[in-house]
Image (cartoon, grey):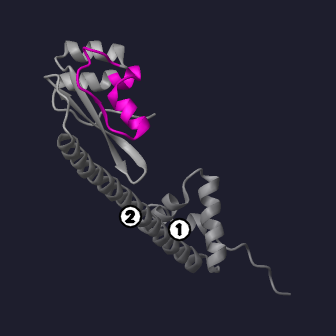
Amino acid sequence: MGLRVIGASTEQITLLELFQVQNEQGPCLDAYTSGSVVINADIRVGSPWPRFAVECIAAGFPSVCAIPLRLKDVILGCLNLFMAEPVGLSLADVALAQALADVASIAIVQDQATRESAIREGHLQHALQSRIAIEQAKGMIAERGRVDMEAAFQRLRGYARNNNRGLTAVAEAIASGALSVELLTPPPGPRGRKA
Protein backbone atom coordinates (compact mmCIF):
# COMPACT_ATOMS: atom_id res chain seq x y z
CA MET A 1 0.00 0.00 0.00
CA GLY A 2 2.92 2.34 0.68
CA LEU A 3 1.41 4.41 3.51
CA ARG A 4 3.76 6.02 5.98
CA VAL A 5 3.42 8.49 8.81
CA ILE A 6 4.29 12.02 7.69
CA GLY A 7 3.39 13.96 10.80
CA ALA A 8 1.45 13.78 14.04
CA SER A 9 0.58 16.19 16.81
CA THR A 10 1.94 14.01 19.63
CA GLU A 11 4.24 11.04 20.16
CA GLN A 12 1.23 8.99 21.27
CA ILE A 13 -0.61 9.66 18.01
CA THR A 14 2.54 8.87 16.02
CA LEU A 15 2.59 5.44 17.68
CA LEU A 16 -1.11 4.88 16.86
CA GLU A 17 -0.48 5.87 13.24
CA LEU A 18 2.48 3.49 13.02
CA PHE A 19 0.38 0.75 14.61
CA GLN A 20 -2.24 1.14 11.87
CA VAL A 21 0.34 0.95 9.09
CA GLN A 22 2.29 -1.96 10.59
CA ASN A 23 -0.80 -4.01 11.46
CA GLU A 24 -2.73 -3.04 8.33
CA GLN A 25 -5.79 -2.22 10.37
CA GLY A 26 -7.50 1.02 11.32
CA PRO A 27 -9.60 3.90 10.02
CA CYS A 28 -6.71 5.35 8.02
CA LEU A 29 -6.31 2.24 5.89
CA ASP A 30 -10.06 1.94 5.35
CA ALA A 31 -10.32 5.60 4.29
CA TYR A 32 -7.28 5.25 2.03
CA THR A 33 -8.67 2.11 0.39
CA SER A 34 -12.25 3.30 0.01
CA GLY A 35 -11.61 6.98 -0.65
CA SER A 36 -14.40 7.78 1.82
CA VAL A 37 -14.50 9.41 5.24
CA VAL A 38 -14.36 6.79 8.01
CA ILE A 39 -15.80 7.69 11.42
CA ASN A 40 -16.17 5.62 14.55
CA ALA A 41 -17.69 7.71 17.34
CA ASP A 42 -17.00 5.18 20.09
CA ILE A 43 -14.65 2.29 19.39
CA ARG A 44 -15.29 0.99 22.91
CA VAL A 45 -18.78 -0.10 21.80
CA GLY A 46 -17.78 -1.79 18.59
CA SER A 47 -14.93 -1.53 16.13
CA PRO A 48 -14.04 -3.21 12.84
CA TRP A 49 -10.38 -2.95 13.97
CA PRO A 50 -10.10 -4.95 17.23
CA ARG A 51 -6.32 -4.67 17.75
CA PHE A 52 -6.27 -1.00 16.79
CA ALA A 53 -9.25 -0.31 19.09
CA VAL A 54 -7.40 -1.76 22.10
CA GLU A 55 -4.36 0.46 21.41
CA CYS A 56 -6.46 3.53 20.70
CA ILE A 57 -8.54 3.15 23.90
CA ALA A 58 -5.38 2.55 25.94
CA ALA A 59 -3.95 5.79 24.54
CA GLY A 60 -7.09 7.67 25.60
CA PHE A 61 -8.79 8.11 22.23
CA PRO A 62 -12.17 6.36 22.06
CA SER A 63 -13.28 8.24 18.94
CA VAL A 64 -11.57 8.36 15.54
CA CYS A 65 -12.11 9.85 12.10
CA ALA A 66 -10.05 9.44 8.91
CA ILE A 67 -10.41 11.87 6.01
CA PRO A 68 -8.87 10.96 2.62
CA LEU A 69 -6.33 13.34 1.10
CA ARG A 70 -7.01 13.30 -2.62
CA LEU A 71 -6.01 14.77 -5.93
CA LYS A 72 -9.01 14.27 -8.18
CA ASP A 73 -9.50 10.48 -8.11
CA VAL A 74 -6.09 9.67 -6.61
CA ILE A 75 -5.88 9.12 -2.85
CA LEU A 76 -2.62 10.59 -1.54
CA GLY A 77 -3.06 9.61 2.10
CA CYS A 78 -5.33 10.43 5.05
CA LEU A 79 -5.82 13.02 7.73
CA ASN A 80 -6.61 11.20 10.97
CA LEU A 81 -8.42 12.76 13.89
CA PHE A 82 -8.25 11.20 17.36
CA MET A 83 -10.74 12.50 19.93
CA ALA A 84 -10.35 12.14 23.70
CA GLU A 85 -14.13 12.00 24.13
CA PRO A 86 -16.50 9.57 22.39
CA VAL A 87 -18.17 12.02 20.02
CA GLY A 88 -19.87 11.71 16.68
CA LEU A 89 -18.70 14.44 14.34
CA SER A 90 -21.37 16.66 12.82
CA LEU A 91 -21.62 17.21 9.07
CA ALA A 92 -20.10 20.68 9.62
CA ASP A 93 -17.14 19.13 11.52
CA VAL A 94 -16.56 16.59 8.73
CA ALA A 95 -16.81 19.33 6.08
CA LEU A 96 -14.25 21.42 7.99
CA ALA A 97 -11.93 18.43 8.33
CA GLN A 98 -12.31 17.70 4.58
CA ALA A 99 -11.45 21.33 3.79
CA LEU A 100 -8.29 20.99 5.91
CA ALA A 101 -7.46 17.72 4.13
CA ASP A 102 -7.95 19.42 0.76
CA VAL A 103 -5.54 22.21 1.72
CA ALA A 104 -3.02 19.58 2.87
CA SER A 105 -3.45 17.75 -0.45
CA ILE A 106 -2.69 20.92 -2.39
CA ALA A 107 0.43 21.53 -0.30
CA ILE A 108 1.63 17.95 -0.85
CA VAL A 109 1.08 18.15 -4.62
CA GLN A 110 2.79 21.55 -4.87
CA ASP A 111 5.76 20.32 -2.82
CA GLN A 112 6.08 17.25 -5.02
CA ALA A 113 5.89 19.37 -8.20
CA THR A 114 8.58 21.71 -6.84
CA ARG A 115 10.87 18.79 -6.00
CA GLU A 116 10.35 17.17 -9.41
CA SER A 117 11.04 20.49 -11.13
CA ALA A 118 14.28 20.93 -9.18
CA ILE A 119 15.36 17.40 -10.10
CA ARG A 120 14.58 18.00 -13.80
CA GLU A 121 16.44 21.30 -13.70
CA GLY A 122 19.44 19.59 -12.11
CA HIS A 123 19.43 16.88 -14.79
CA LEU A 124 19.22 19.46 -17.57
CA GLN A 125 22.00 21.55 -16.04
CA HIS A 126 24.21 18.46 -15.71
CA ALA A 127 23.51 17.46 -19.31
CA LEU A 128 24.36 20.96 -20.52
CA GLN A 129 27.61 21.07 -18.53
CA SER A 130 28.54 17.62 -19.82
CA ARG A 131 27.85 18.66 -23.40
CA ILE A 132 29.96 21.81 -23.01
CA ALA A 133 32.90 19.86 -21.58
CA ILE A 134 32.68 17.23 -24.34
CA GLU A 135 32.57 19.89 -27.07
CA GLN A 136 35.55 21.72 -25.54
CA ALA A 137 37.56 18.51 -25.31
CA LYS A 138 36.64 17.54 -28.89
CA GLY A 139 37.79 20.95 -30.09
CA MET A 140 41.11 20.62 -28.29
CA ILE A 141 41.67 17.09 -29.62
CA ALA A 142 40.70 18.12 -33.18
CA GLU A 143 43.04 21.11 -33.12
CA ARG A 144 46.04 19.30 -31.61
CA GLY A 145 45.54 16.07 -33.52
CA ARG A 146 44.58 17.78 -36.76
CA VAL A 147 41.50 15.60 -37.13
CA ASP A 148 37.84 16.37 -37.73
CA MET A 149 35.33 16.61 -34.86
CA GLU A 150 33.97 13.08 -35.41
CA ALA A 151 37.48 11.58 -35.19
CA ALA A 152 38.14 13.73 -32.11
CA PHE A 153 34.99 12.35 -30.46
CA GLN A 154 36.02 8.77 -31.31
CA ARG A 155 39.40 9.35 -29.64
CA LEU A 156 37.74 10.87 -26.59
CA ARG A 157 35.25 8.02 -26.28
CA GLY A 158 37.93 5.39 -26.93
CA TYR A 159 40.16 6.84 -24.20
CA ALA A 160 37.25 6.87 -21.72
CA ARG A 161 36.36 3.26 -22.49
CA ASN A 162 39.95 1.98 -22.48
CA ASN A 163 40.59 3.63 -19.11
CA ASN A 164 37.22 2.69 -17.58
CA ARG A 165 36.27 6.31 -17.01
CA GLY A 166 33.16 8.30 -17.77
CA LEU A 167 33.12 10.28 -21.00
CA THR A 168 32.18 13.51 -19.23
CA ALA A 169 34.87 13.04 -16.57
CA VAL A 170 37.56 12.59 -19.25
CA ALA A 171 36.24 15.58 -21.22
CA GLU A 172 36.23 17.78 -18.10
CA ALA A 173 39.77 16.65 -17.23
CA ILE A 174 40.99 17.56 -20.72
CA ALA A 175 39.16 20.90 -20.76
CA SER A 176 40.56 21.84 -17.35
CA GLY A 177 44.11 20.72 -18.21
CA ALA A 178 44.10 17.95 -15.57
CA LEU A 179 44.52 15.40 -18.38
CA SER A 180 46.97 16.11 -21.17
CA VAL A 181 45.32 16.33 -24.56
CA GLU A 182 48.50 14.78 -26.00
CA LEU A 183 47.42 11.43 -24.53
CA LEU A 184 44.59 11.45 -27.06
CA THR A 185 46.57 12.92 -29.95
CA PRO A 186 49.39 10.53 -30.73
CA PRO A 187 52.19 11.95 -32.81
CA PRO A 188 51.99 11.16 -36.52
CA GLY A 189 53.93 8.10 -37.67
CA PRO A 190 57.35 8.46 -39.39
CA ARG A 191 57.23 9.88 -42.86
CA GLY A 192 58.67 7.90 -45.69
CA ARG A 193 61.61 9.25 -47.70
CA LYS A 194 61.17 10.56 -51.17
CA ALA A 195 63.08 8.70 -53.82
Specify whether 181 is left or right of 53.
Answer: right
Which numbered dot is residue 121?
A: 2
How packed mark 1 is, by other alpha carbons closer than 10 Å (few <14, some 14-19, many 20 or more), is many
How packed mark 2 is, by other alpha carbons closer than 10 Å (few <14, some 14-19, many 20 or more), is few
Tell me the element at label 2. helix
Q: Nearer the viewer, residue 54 or 168?
A: 54
Q: Which residue is mark 1?
A: 181
Given the image, on which type of amino acid does mark 1 rest? Val
Residue 149 is inside the magenta segment: no
Q: Position of residue 63 (x, y in %)?
A: 21, 24
Tell me the element at label 1. helix
Specify whether 86 is left or right of 119.
Answer: left
Which residue, as the protein is rendered here, is positioned at the far right? 195
Q: Is residue 186 visible?
A: no
Q: Nearer the viewer, residue 10 or 116?
A: 10
Q: Position of residue 181 (x, y in %)?
A: 53, 68
Quadrant position of residue 50 = top left
Q: Nearer the viewer, residue 139 or 145?
A: 139
Can you say whether 86 is above or below 183 in the image? above
Q: Is residue 36 visible?
A: yes
Given the image, on which type of amino acid does mark 2 rest? Glu
- Which residues make up the magenta segment? 20-47
Specify whether 94 is left or right of 129.
Answer: left
Question: Are the residues at dot 2 and dot 1 in contact (C-beta closer than 8 Å)?
Answer: no
Can you say whether 89 is above or below 12 in the image? below
Q: Position of residue 36 (x, y in %)?
A: 37, 39
Quadrant position of residue 155 = bottom right
Comparing marks 2 and 1, which lies closer to the viewer? 2
Residue 39 is inside the magenta segment: yes
Which numbered dot is residue 35?
A: none
Quadrant position of residue 191 = bottom right
